[in-house]
Image: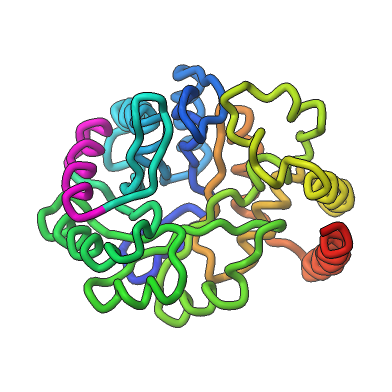
Amino acid sequence: MNKRKLGKTDLELSVIGFGAWAIGGGQWEYAWGPQDDTESLKAILKAYELGINWVDTAAAYGLGHSEVVVGKALKELGRDNLIVATKCGITWDSTGKINRWVDAAQVRREIDDSLRRLDIETIDLYQVHWPCPDENIEEVWSEMANCVRQGKARHIGVSNYNIDQIRRVMKIAPVASVQNRYSIIHRDIENDLLPFCDENKIGVVCYSPMGKGLLTGKITAERVASFAPDDHRRNDPDFIGPKFQANLQLVCALEPIARRSGKTLAQLALAWTLRRNEVTSAIAGARNSRQIEDTAKAGDWKLAVEDVEEIAWLLEKYENALVATF
């Protein structure tokens, strides 16, 4: 498994990270349906066995449950064997509905709660999940810096921030990393955020590089119809109507590229994301060992130039189809 240095930090991340969103389980607003904790634990242990050295979770995932499961994995593996990244900045109510809102006091509460659930003394990478509300950004980042001074976090990063917001917090304390969405079907960060992070030596970790499963080739209309009632993808625009159909057509067109290299579509999606040197690591969510065994194989695959060019051509057709549809 290849590794890349995270910005200016001393962290060397495997280019595939274990995403712990889905293992939080069901019964909350952004769930992926029910989940077996035993399978989750096996998946994390298998990821480590395959060379994945870091896990990304958040307080909100499963309303704290994902962090508990990750904590159990740390007990089995040993604290020093896994780099832990988690996030603050989302509250929730008794029904599992979430609210993106954070201030300094909440950062203080959340980091202590996360440390307790993970059962560790220090978080390797502590991230602000969303920049909400915008007017609290400086206050929140000052408190994040306090977490480092207090020894509760080694490094701090942001998630879902734009360049202007990153510039604002950089004046207060260094930004170790940015975690934003990036995949074949969501390429917003390519022309501005990636070059900005490269210029400022900020690490980039990408979430949803497989498009929440869309780019694995395993999603069909029938599969979506059978999603658990609390699977948030039922309400995701990428899985609905004409856009969903365009996504499926793109995946069909990508399949021969993966096949001729003896790879799966999931591996192709990850390798495409990692083709950019600015990207430190791509987060691959997994709910069982089989899934992570598949995605981990992308960790040492470099796409051929002709593959990248063919995908670019397909994406131009895809964009034109979307414009015609909408």
* Residue pictured at 63% horizontal, 42% vertical: 212
Q: How is the image coloured?
A: rainbow
The residue sitting at the bottom extreme is 199
What residue lies at 65% left-to-right and 64% top-to-bottom?
187
Give the image location of residue 157, x and y in percent.
34, 60
Which quadrant of the structure image shows residue 311?
Answer: bottom right
State the predominant SS element of the stretch in magenta.
helix
Measured along the vertical axis of the image, is residue 89 above or below residue 159? above
Q: Is residue 312 left or right of residue 21?
A: right
Q: Residue furthest left?
A: 150
Q: Residue at x 42, y 44 (%)?
A: 56
98 drawn magenta = no
Q: Position of residue 152 (x, y in %)?
A: 17, 49
The x and y percentages for residue 109 are 18, 42
Is 266 displayed left or right of 299 in the figure? right
Closer to us: 17 or 285: 285
Residue 1 visible in the shown view: no
* Rendered image quadrant of residue 11: bottom left
68 sits to left or right of 242: left
Q: In the rendered structure, does residue 119 fall within the stretch colored magenta?
A: yes
Residue at horizontal 82%, vertical 59%? Answer: 326
Q: Residue 309 or 57: which is nearer the viewer?
A: 57
- Can you say whether 79 is above or below 189 in the image? above
Q: Establish if 264 lies above or below 164.
A: above
- Image position of 56 with respect to 74: above or below: below
Q: How many numbered tags mark residues here? A: 0
Residue 211 appears in the figure: yes
Magenta-highlighted residues: 103-121
The answer to which quarter of the image holds residue 316 is bottom right
Residue 126: image location, x then y, percent? 30, 52
Between residues 2 and 17, which one lies in front from this camera angle?
17
